[in-house]
Amino acid sequence: MNVFISYSHRDKKYADLISKSLEIEGHEIWIDSIKFKEGDNWLSKITNTIKDIDAFILIISKNSLSSEWVSREISAIALGEISKGRTRIIPVLLDKSTVPQYIALHQYVDLSNDIERGIDRIIHALSDTPDKITLGDKKWKRSYRRAISELSRVLKDGRLTLVTGAGISIAAGIPSWNMLLLKLLESMMMKISNNYSMSLKGADPNEFQKRYGTSAIVVGKYLKSNLGHDFLEELRDALYAINPITCDTIKSIVNLAKIEKAGKSLDSIITFNYDSLIEENLANNNIKCQAIYSEGMRNGTEELPIYHVNGYLPRRGKLTKSNEIVFSEEAYHSQFIDPFSWSNLIQLNKLSHNTCLFLGISLTDPNLRRLLDVANRKNPSKALNHYIIKDIPNMGNKNDNVDDLALFLAEQDYNELGLNVIWIEEYSEIPTILNKIYYG
C-alpha cells in the first residue's frame, strides 16, 4: 500500500518511527517527497504527488498546526477526499491540540500516551483485517469532547471571553438586523411623508429595500440622517417592541457567569448587540456586571464587564451622547480606520490574552475579521486558540460534493483566522454546549 506521511519537521522522530514500522510491514512510504521551488503552484504540486496514494497519515501536533506547509498538505488531502469520495486518512495525535473538524471527523490514533501501542494500531488499520471501526473511516457524528474540555478548563481559570452577536438575542424576541432596518425604514418614510407633504401612503419598506437593493450600512446612513434626533429613540423602540426578556442561550450565558468556589468565572463578554438583555438577566440572578460602551468606562473588581463595542441602548433611562452607536456607513468606517479606538483595543487584548468563544456571529464584519487576522498573525504558535459555534449551512445542493466543499472552505477560512469550529445543525444546540462547558 502507498502511504503518505504528512508532518512538521519538528516532529521528524515520530514520522521516522511510523515510517520504519510500516516499511517492515511491506508498505511503500512517501515522506519528504514534495519539493517546492519559488513560484510553484502548491495545490497542483501536492495534488499531483498524492494522486496515487492509498492512505494518508497526518501527524497532528502544535508544530504541524502552526506550519503553513503542513496546513497546505492537509488541505490538499482533504480536497482530494472530497473529490474521490473515499480516502483512508489516519490522523495521529502527538499532543492535546484541537484539530480542524474536517480532520477530526476521521477515527484517529493518539500517540501522546503510548507510542508503541499507537503504531500497532496504525499497522493493524492498514492490514487486511482492520478494526471493526476502521481507523481512517469517517465517524457519522462529530465529537467536540476536546473542545468542550478545553473551554471548560479556561472558564475555570477565569480566561474565557464570550463574543456575542445578534444570533443569541433573536430567540428572546430582539428583531433580526433586516427586521430592525425595515421597522426603521417604515418610521423614516412616515416622518418624510409628514414633514414634506409627500404621499407615501401604502409604501412597503420591504419592497423599497428589495427594489433599490441598498446595502444594510448604507440604509443605516439614510435612517440616521433622516430620523435625526429621533433616531436613537426610534431604534430603541424597535429593539424592545415586543418586550423581549430571555431565551435558553442567554440563560446558559448567565450560568457561565456564576462565580465558582475558586472565585473564577467568565473573564468578560464582548457583544456586538445594542440591547441590555444579558445585563438584565445577570441582575435578575444577583450577578454584578457593568455595561461598558464608551472610552474611559471601567468595571468594578467584582463586576463582570460587558463590552458593547457597537454601542449600547438600555431598555430604560435617558439616552445621551455616550449612547452613540455604530450603525451607519461612516461609523463603520471610523471604527475600521482607527486602530486605537477603545473597542478595537479591547477586542485585540482579549483575543491576545484569553480564549474567546464566538456565539451568534456571522463573521462577515470586515473590522472583526481584521482584528482576528492581526491577533492570529501575532500569535507565534499559530495555534487555534479561539472557538466559534456555527450552524451548518443548509445549502440544499443536489451534488453532495458541493456541500462538502462549501463546508470545508468555510472551516478553512475560520481556521485561518485562528478559530476552531463547533458545527451545529440548530441554534437550539447552543445552550446544551454552554451547559456542558459549565459543568465540565
Image (cartoon, helix red, strand yellow):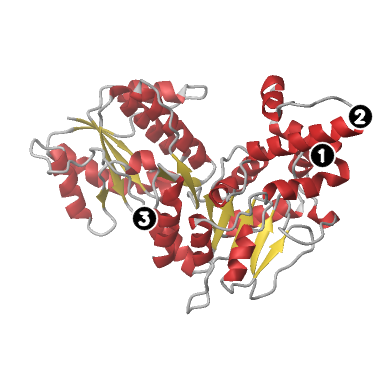
Task: Report the amino acid beneath label 1.
Answer: Lys
Q: How crowded is mark 3: few (under 14 residues within 10 Å), some or many (20 or more)?
A: few
Q: Name the residue under label 3.
A: 146
Q: Name the residue under label 1.
A: 224
Q: Quadrant of residue 366?
A: top right
Q: Is residue 340 left or right of residue 161?
A: right
Between 253 and 374, which is closer to the camera in this rendering? 253
Q: Can residue 66 be seen in this snapshot?
A: no
Of labels 3 and 2, earlier in sequence is 3
Q: Name the residue under label 2.
A: 196
Q: Residue at x 59, y 72 (%)?
A: 287
- Depth-wise, is mark 1 or mark 2 nearer the camera? 2
Q: Relative to 361, does residue 152 appear above or below in the rendering?
A: below
From mark 3 to mark 1, how far is it between C-alphas?
46 Å
Q: In which quarter of the image is residue 276?
A: bottom right
What residue occupies the far left of the structure in this picture? 129
What kind of element bears circle 2? loop
Of labels 3 and 1, earlier in sequence is 3
> Residue 111 location in percent, x, y?
26, 53
Q: Residue at x 59, y 67 (%)?
A: 282
Task: Report the amino acid beneath label 3.
Answer: Arg
Q: How crowded is mark 2: few (under 14 residues within 10 Å), some or many (20 or more)?
A: few
Position of the C terminus, as image quadrant, is: bottom left
- Depth-wise, is mark 3 or mark 2 nearer the camera? 2
